[in-house]
Image: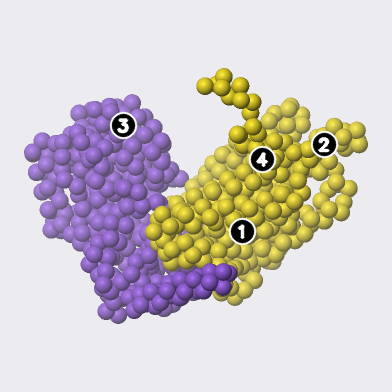
Amino acid sequence: MQLVLEKRAERSGAIALVSPLIAIGLTIVTMVILFAILGKNPLLALHAYFIAPLTDGYSLQEIAVKATPLVMIAIGLSLCYLANAWNIGAEGQFLIGAVAGSWIAVKTQGTDAGAWVLPAMLVLAAAAGALYALMPAICKVKFGASEILTSLMLVYVADLFLDYLVRGPWRDPQGFNFPTTAEFDPVATVPLLIEGGRLHLGSIIALLVVAAAAILLGRTIKGFEIRVVGAAPRAARFGGFNANQLTILTFAVSGALAGLAGIIEVAGPVGHLQPGISPGYGFTAIIVAFLGRLNPLGILIAGLFLALTFIGGEQAQIAMKIPLDVTKVFQGILLFYVLACDSLILYRFKLSFPNRQVARGTH
Amino acid sequence: MRKSILALATGLLLAGSVSAASAADKLKVGFIYLGPIGDLGWTYQHDLARQALVKELGDQIETTYLENVPEGPDAERSIEQLVRAGNKLIFTTSFGYMDPTLKVAKKYPNVHFEHATGYKRAPNMSTYSAKWFQGRYIQGLIAAKMSKSGVLGYIGSFPIPEVVSGINATMLAAQTIKPDIKVKIIWANTWFDPGKEADAAKALIDQGADVIMQHTDSPAAMQIASERGKLAFGQDSEMIKFGPKTQLTSILDTWGPYYIERVKAELAGTWKSQDSWGGLDSHMFAMAPYTNMPDDVKKMAEDAQAAIIAGKLHPFKCPIVGQDGKPVECKGGDHLDDSQILGMNFYVKGIDDKLPGK
């Protein structure tokens, strides 16, 4: 008797709905076993991870702050991926956006520049992110270069460019040679929403982005075009949709959103430009995009959920002395189960009884 | 069935909060670590100090740490999480936590903060660091004695005053032994990256260096020097096991006595914001045993160490000539004063390298 995976005739809608829940359930079971092996009380640990951060306003704010860049980038990436354009370089577009926006902040520092500074920073950051993303898009359309490779390699270029600026021309003169710009002026800072908290305007912008993407995909011809080009390229060609144009467009939009996320992070929670402004947001957002099934609302939930595991992991470290590595294992296990369960949408388990003679022959 | 699970869960939660309540009488002390603790290096040394603290005052305090906290947007949240978990004294153990620590300190005036190696302070935020340049001076003496090629290799991390003053102290010491000694410097632009550090060590040895010094964290350079039959100094931790025939000595970060002193002050209610900058005399750091050198070199190193502790030898004793050939202003009487060392942004004469960003 053998257990085999068999391709379904069509994708199962019911499984598509419950598969994330199965994945989370399996993750929790695995973690309970892991916590027990570590000698920690599994119920308390799960409480620290999932419940405690949801029970006070401070942690909720922090979850929103952490999820903001992830959701914003992931929305852009989902448009690319739906259109079959593989932008892996959101991290670089994030950094370039941060750099471009910071340029205005650095140049107006100490002057009496008015309220135009922050809006100008946001616009410039989005434009720079879009232009940076256009490089791999145009190389793909014109020369057939793999956008996966080129967009990824541009991440390192952006990283080193930022590094050069904060060690050289933009370095804080009062900063003892440390690689950072001076703190941005108040007019160059993203306003906070709650006095004494860290929740900032960026979270509202992220929500608007989610809503805009939902309308684009659900209610417009362009959104339909994106989905058709991705799902059925040949049909799209017959329908007169131009896949190349769409690659350029989705790359530009996702670059703009990543760039916007970059400047919001720098002008918001960080307050100055420095290396290490992104703990890998551009890459984590890829996970968020797929965890959210390339659906705007799904991405919002996935972003918040991933943020919850970060905050909860920290609280578990404090409250129960659970090592940080366990949080990473936890995130890894979750993604593993999500992908594994997703295969059940297109495949199903089947018991097969191989022919006896064949079985004998193998002995 | 469901009810009993719920009851079990609440029971467990209650049990948890009861044990938390009994711990509430103890002073909670928090730590933010840059790296994972691992088994050597910067964060490891801070954790050794935390363990010493627990050993000494474990019946009165409870410690908590968050490891691997990047010096970016997450740092402020991590520090605040420790505050919200009830920690009343918090050590943030890397330079990059300076601004986040200050932000949280302003928000919670009743919590005390100790920030390592920074320069911004507040009524509830102290800073602490060590005069590592004293150790670098001793290493410079040893290096000049042990080098046959007359070329030292130096792996820099970032061109900040702490690192620059280390290079200068090394060279000033080495020049007292061999006036025409050379130093080759490679800026790794990282505190910890074994691959880069190993490449830097190889490049330095290829350029003729036969003694390798480092201001980075990993034992990679020690291993390369060992493979190539050269000599090297460790950094932060004891690294002799990576080069039993290679390590001359190592600067060991020993924060334990300071942590114990500050926690005692907190317990006694006498904690005040201050700037501590201790040297070999106040045990902020120590030198690993002097190994792989002849007895006379060892004696010279020990004598220099004793003289520094006794205050008879100052590594930045005037006159000091800058790289440009002009004498450096001597603000501290017969040696450079603390502010000149803490903000050191120049090379001394004889260093054949351009300070990055100059």
In this figure, which residue is indicated by the disc labeled 3?
Answer: B224
Name which quarter of the figure residue A130 lies in: top right
Do marks 3 and 2 both belong to one polypeptide chain?
Answer: no
Do marks 1 and 2 both belong to one polypeptide chain?
Answer: yes
Q: Is residue A220 visible?
A: yes
Disc 2, SS = loop
**Which amino acid type corresponds to the residue marked 2 in the rendered image?**
Ala
Chain letter of mark 3 equals: B
A114 with respect to A25 (left or right): right
Which of the chains is purple? B
* Numbered disc total: 4
In this figure, which residue is indicated by the disc labeled 2?
Answer: A232
- Give the spatial CA distance, label 3 vs label 4: 53 Å
Name the N-terminal-most of marks 1 and 4: 1
- Give the spatial CA distance, label 2 vs label 4: 27 Å
**Which amino acid type corresponds to the residue marked 3 in the rendered image?**
Ile
Name which quarter of the figure residue B187 lies in: top left
Q: Residue furthest top?
A: A361
- Give the spatial CA distance, label 1 vs label 4: 29 Å
What shade has chain A been given?
A: yellow
